[in-house]
Amino acid sequence: MADKDTDLKKIKEIIEIMKENELLEVEIKHGDDKIFLKRSQPHSSVGGVLSAVPAIRPEPGSAQHIQAGGAEALIQTYATGATGSSEVLAEIKSPLVGTYYSTPSPDSEHYVEVGSTVDPQTVVCIIEAMKVMNEIKAETSGTIVEVLVTNGQAVEYGQVLYKVKPD
């Protein structure tokens, strides 16, 4: 695939085509790249729960699953270390621009920390956008190995928030 911005534009175009034609699933194969898009049924409410946004350019041999509508994603990238072993990491990315909060309130415990075990329904953080608090779910099972943002930090669309070692 081309660069990250071009890939993102193409995926957004495909999502719009899916919405216009009321398609719930699309699978695209191009060479070694494979993208599976799945939309949930349209929701009547605005805000609410959003899911992680996918990485746009996976490493060779990686798997990429994207669900439009809720922007749900499971992205696996393969990193080969000096030992030659392969480690699979999933990235949890911000589905929107806003302010990242690691706790539900200032005096509460963090949703997750390094070492926390998550499943697809685990809320990992809140992103506030336009005065709406959006709960972000992990959308993958595993253990948080890295937290890349701090509480109260402004985040961009697609910014990596966490790295997860899948179960």
Image: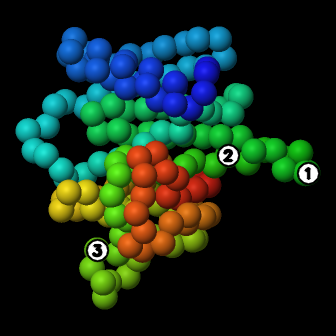
| Picture residue at 45% right of the left edge, 16% below the top | 27
147 or 90, nearer to the observer? 147
**Residue 88 circle label:** 2
Q: Position of residue 37 (x, y in %)?
A: 40, 25
Q: Residue furthest right?
A: 83
| Picture residue at 36% right of the left edge, 19% below the top | 13
How far apart marks 1 and 2 lie (CA) works out to 15 Å
How far apart marks 2 and 3 lie (CA) works out to 30 Å
Relative to 113, say whether 132 is above or below: above
Q: Are marks 1 and 2 in contact (CB under 8 Å)?
A: no
Total marks drawn? 3
N-terminal label among 2 and 3: 2
Q: In screen coordinates, is 16 left or right of 142?
A: left
Kind of residue at badge 3: Pro
Judging by the rendered image, the residue that carries numbered circle 3 is 104
- Dot 1 surroundings within 10 Å: few (below 14), some, or many (20 or more)? few
Kind of residue at badge 2: Val
Kind of residue at badge 1: Thr
Q: Position of residue 153 (x, y in %)?
A: 42, 68
Q: Position of residue 108 (x, y in %)?
A: 32, 83
Res. 146 in view = yes
N-terminal label among 3 and 1: 1
**Residue 83 circle label:** 1
- Which picture quadrant has residue 72? top left
